[in-house]
Image (spheres, coloured by chain):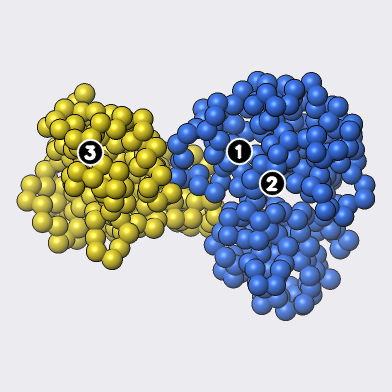
Chain colours: A yellow, B blue
Amino acid sequence: MRNLRLKLKFVGTKFHGWQIQENAKSVQGEIQKAVDRIFGDNSPVYGCSRTDAGVHANEYYCNFHTNKTIPCGKTVDAVNANIDDDISVISCDEVDADFHSRYDCKSKEYIYLIRNSSVRDPFLNGRVWLYKYKLDEELMNKAAINFIGKYDFASFCSTGSSVVDTVRTVTDAKVERDGDILKFTVSADGFLYNMVRIMTGTLVNVSENKIDPDDIKKIILSKDRSLAGITAPPQGLYLNRVLYEK
Amino acid sequence: MRNLRLKLKFVGTKFHGWQIQENAKSVQGEIQKAVDRIFGDNSPVYGCSRTDAGVHANEYYCNFHTNKTIPCGKTVDAVNANIDDDISVISCDEVDADFHSRYDCKSKEYIYLIRNSSVRDPFLNGRVWLYKYKLDEELMNKAAINFIGKYDFASFCSTGSSVVDTVRTVTDAKVERDGDILKFTVSADGFLYNMVRIMTGTLVNVSENKIDPDDIKKIILSKDRSLAGITAPPQGLYLNRVLYEK
């Protein structure tokens, strides 16, 4: 059977996340419905990540198996014609039979955007966290650097998660400002439930002088969620890049 | 009476243009309702331009008179709290008693954005014209330059317009490409009904070799709408800058 990988982009606002759900619109639901209609193999669509409701993707991969010979170029057009406009298939390629979008992923990069202004930008509604008090990006960046390394990130995982192994390797973490927009970028071999949103909330708490930037390592080592900061809202979060070996 | 000028920004998608209408959401309707609620002077709100349904504004000015002493800073917050999220009041200033947002406007700049790709970008839905065949920005720019000058632009005005004087002075007109995005920028002392959208459609027709770039002047001089190109759809159009003397 052929194994087709789709590269997607989506605005998460109206979806209840990636994962298929009864009675709620999901990104996987849209893709699965389109693939079933076009290919008719009844093959499950596997996603690279379970994104939350309201979270966006500048880059997202999924894959499915098929016996049909529809070429990749036509697949892009056909799936795009059969899914909600807030999702777009950017490209399609044929991958090894055993490739899996989630298990073969080596690294992911997330960005979190904060609009640091008292006034909303209507073009960014649902696409940033609007935070009106002046944020100190240098202090936040100083704190963010402490996320880099291989650690048990249990302090940065929402309670109720069923994940057993909470060790992850963060390879990059930085905060930059471009005018009113603060961007937190973080890369890792994997992420825990709400990890980036809790990291972002913690960085904002650092700017608010509620958490000392030098205490980040202590918070990590405590493995105590209650010592980390607030969970930032979903709408500023974007899955930005997904890396595979080949 | 004080004369307050508001600087706005709005995503036009859900509005039936600037002008107040019965049974339809308009930008003016939102601002007027908020100003009436906050100031209670029953003063009309004057806009700088009648934008069409679906057209956006990166910068838009309106003004109204009031006897109340509410300061400008508070006015921004109060109006923002009372209008649809797709509009934002960026700032407020007190202007001369006889200032009028529309009549005192010296020049306006519009931009028109075309996404030149076969694949939609979901983040730009409703914010660009998606045009899939390869556009020749150099040819379009060569044609656009011919719009510059003081002319009777009747050929670039939708029929049914009640405007008598169709002479306008275009001071800038250019086409630039940034990746998949083509941007047409045009500045003038005033614009006719659908003028930028017809100019854009004409430039696309130039790229399609349906209109010769050297015929733009002839089309202008003909004062014949039927010789110009198609009317581009509203969603790519942005009022981008509005200039007053002071």
Determine the secondary structure under disc 1.
Answer: strand
**Cα gap from disc 3 to disc 1, whole angstroms:** 33 Å
Mark seen at residue A63: 3
Q: Amino acid at mark 2?
A: Leu
Q: Amino acid at mark 3?
A: Asn
- Viewer-proximal residue among A222 and A235: A235
Asked whether the residues under marks 2 and 1 belong to the same chain, the reply is yes
Give the percent coordinates (x, y) of residue B77. Answer: 59, 65
Instruction: Please say if B179 is above or below B41.
Output: above
- Viewer-proximal residue among B59 and A56: A56
Instruction: Please say if B163 is above or below A111.
Output: below
Chain holding disc 2: B
Q: Residue at 88% of width from left, 52% of height from top?
A: B163
Give the percent coordinates (x, y) of residue A166. Answer: 11, 47
Q: Quadrant of the C terminus of chain A?
A: top left
Chain holding disc 1: B
* Residue bearing the label numbered 2: B239
**Which label lies toward us, 2 or 1?**
1
Give the percent coordinates (x, y) of residue B136. Answer: 61, 23
Q: Amino acid at mark 1?
A: Leu
**Cα gap from disc 2 to disc 1, whole angstroms:** 11 Å
Q: Quadrant of residue B70?
A: bottom right
* Residue bearing the label numbered 1: B113
